[in-house]
Amino acid sequence: MSGVNEIRGTFSVTYDHRVLFSDGVFEPGNAALADVMTPGEAGRPAGVLAFIDTGLAGAMPELAGRVAGYVRGWPGRLRLVAEPVVVPGGEAAKKGTETFERAVRALHDAGLDRHSYALIVGGGAVLDAVGFAASVVHRGVRHVRVPTTVLGQNDAGIGVKNGIDLFGRKNFLGTFSPPVAVVNDFTLLRGLPAGHWRDGTAEAVKVALIRDGAFFEWLDERAGLLAGRDEAAMRRLIFRCAELHIRQITAGGDPFEQGSARPLDFGHWAAHKLEQLSNFSITHGHAVAVGIAIDTLYAARTGLLAAADADRVVGCLRKLGFELAVGRGVSPLGRERLEPLLEGVAEFREHLGGQLSITMLRGIGQAVELHEIDLDLMQRCAADVLFADE
Ligand SMILES: NC(=O)c1ccc[n+]([C@@H]2O[C@H](COP(=O)([O-])OP(=O)(O)OC[C@H]3O[C@@H](n4cnc5c(N)ncnc54)[C@H](O)[C@@H]3O)[C@@H](O)[C@H]2O)c1
Ligand SMILES: [Zn+2]
C-alpha cells in the first residue's frame, strides 16, 4: 500500500535589523560599536576580529591601529583575538575565492566561535566577500558592518545579502545573512575618491524612483551640491536611503527574495552586465546610473512613463556627474552589437529562477514589475544611452 506520512512544524526567526549613525566610531569613548557586540555567556568578553579594506587603510594609515585600540579599550566587553586583517578593496575582493578564503583562514586561525564577531570595515565589495566568509564559517559567525563608501552606507551595507563573483558571474556564490548591526560613520567617507563618492548617489536615485517621489525631487534639486561634495546633503541622502532600505527589507514581505520581484534591483540587470563586460573598469554605482537611464528610456518608449519624467531622471543622473554614454569603453559592445548586454536580462531571471521580473517605472516614485521585455526595443534604448555620442 502506498501512502504519505508527514510530520510537520513551522518556525520563524526574528531579526532585529539595526543601522546606527555616529561620527568617530573608533574614538575610545564612542559606545556605538561596543554596544552592538554583546559579551558571551557568563559575561565573557566577545572575541572580535576586524577586517579592513586596503583602500580605506591607504586613505587612513592609522586606522588599523585605531580599530585595535578601540577594541582593547573595552576590556570587560570585547576581546581583540588578533590584529586587524587588511584585505584587498574593490571588485578584486569579490573576484573568485581568494579574499573569501583568506577571510575564512583568518577566522579559523583566530579561533573565532559563534559568540564572537567579525567586524568588517570597508566598501561594498569587502563587506560582500568577508561577510560571505563569516556567514559560512561555523555555519555563521556574527558580523558587524562598518561601511566606508557612500554606496556601502546607503545601499550595500544595509542589505541582508553578501556574495562573490565566480565563473565570470556577479554574486554567483553568496548567502542571505543579516548583520548584527550596521554602523555608519560619515567621517570615514572623507578620503573617498570623487568617483566613489558619486557612485552611491546612483543607488539613491534608484530607491527614490521606485519608492519615494518626494525624495527624487529633493535629490534632483541638490544634485549639484551632492556632486560638489556637500556633506550635509550627503548625510541626509544616506539617512533617507537607509530608511527606505530598512522599510523594504523589514516590511516588503520578501527579505530573502523567495519571490521573483527584486525592486531594489531596478536598473541592475544592465548594471551587472556592464560591470562584467567592462572587466569592472565601470564601477557598480556608475553602472547602476547607466542601467537606470536605459530602463527609464524603455519605460518612456513603452508609454509607461511620461517622456518629461524620463528626461528629468536622465538629467538628474547627469547633474550628479555620471557619464552615461560609456559604450565605447566596453569593447565587446557596439551600437549594432548589443547582444552581450541583452544577455543580462536572461541572467537576471536565471539568478532568481522562476518568472522574469524586471522592475520598471510608471511614474517617479512608482515601480511596476514587467514579466516580458521587448528585446529589440530594449536594444535600441541601450544603444541610445550607451552610444549617445555617435
Ligand atoms: N550585498 C548587497 O546587497 C549589495 C548591494 C549593492 C552593491 N553591492 C556590491 O558592492 C560593491 C560595490 O561597493 P562600493 O561601491 O562600496 O565599492 P567598492 O567596495 O568596490 O570600493 C570602492 C573603492 O574604494 C576603496 N575604499 C573603500 N572605502 C574607502 C574610504 N573610506 N576611503 C578611500 N577609499 C576607500 C576600496 O578599496 C575600493 O578601491 C559591488 O561589488 C556590488 O555588487 C552589494
Ligand atoms: Zn546596486
Image: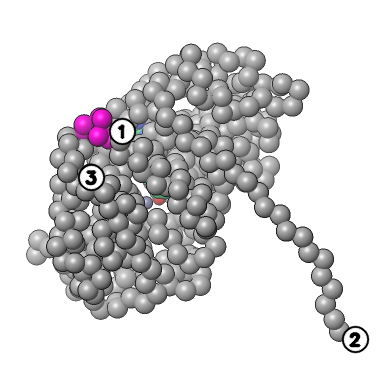
Q: What amino acid type is highlighted by mark number 1?
A: Arg
Kindly state the secondary structure of the residue where label 2 is placed.
loop
Which of these two is toward me, 39 or 341?
39
Q: What amino acid type is highlighted by mark number 3?
A: Leu
Q: From what the image shows, is residue 202 above or below residue 193? A: below
Which of these two is toward me, 313 or 28?
313
- Residue at 41% x, 42% y is 243
Q: Quadrant of residue 234?
A: top left
* Residue 247 among magenta residues: no
Residue lying farthest to the left in this orientation: 390
- Residue at 50% x, 52% y is 251
On-image quarter of the C terminus: bottom left
Q: Which residue is mark 1?
A: 235
Q: What amino acid type is highlighted by mark number 2?
A: Met
Mark 1 or mark 2, earlier in chain: 2
Q: Position of residue 196 (x, y in %)?
A: 29, 40
Badge number at residue 219: 3
Which of these two is toward me, 368 or 316?
368
Mark whose residue sits in front, 1 or 2: 1
- Residue at 61% x, 37% y is 142
Label 1 – label 2 distance at C-alpha: 68 Å
Note whether ligand 1 is within 8 Å of mark 2: no
Which secondary structure is most common in the magenta stretch?
A: helix
Q: Is residue 257 left or right of residue 77?
A: left
- Residue at 33% x, 57% y is 210
Q: Which residue is mark 2?
A: 1
Q: Is residue 6 left or right of residue 354?
A: right
Kindly state the secondary structure of the residue where label 3 is placed.
helix
Highlighted range, magenta: 229-234
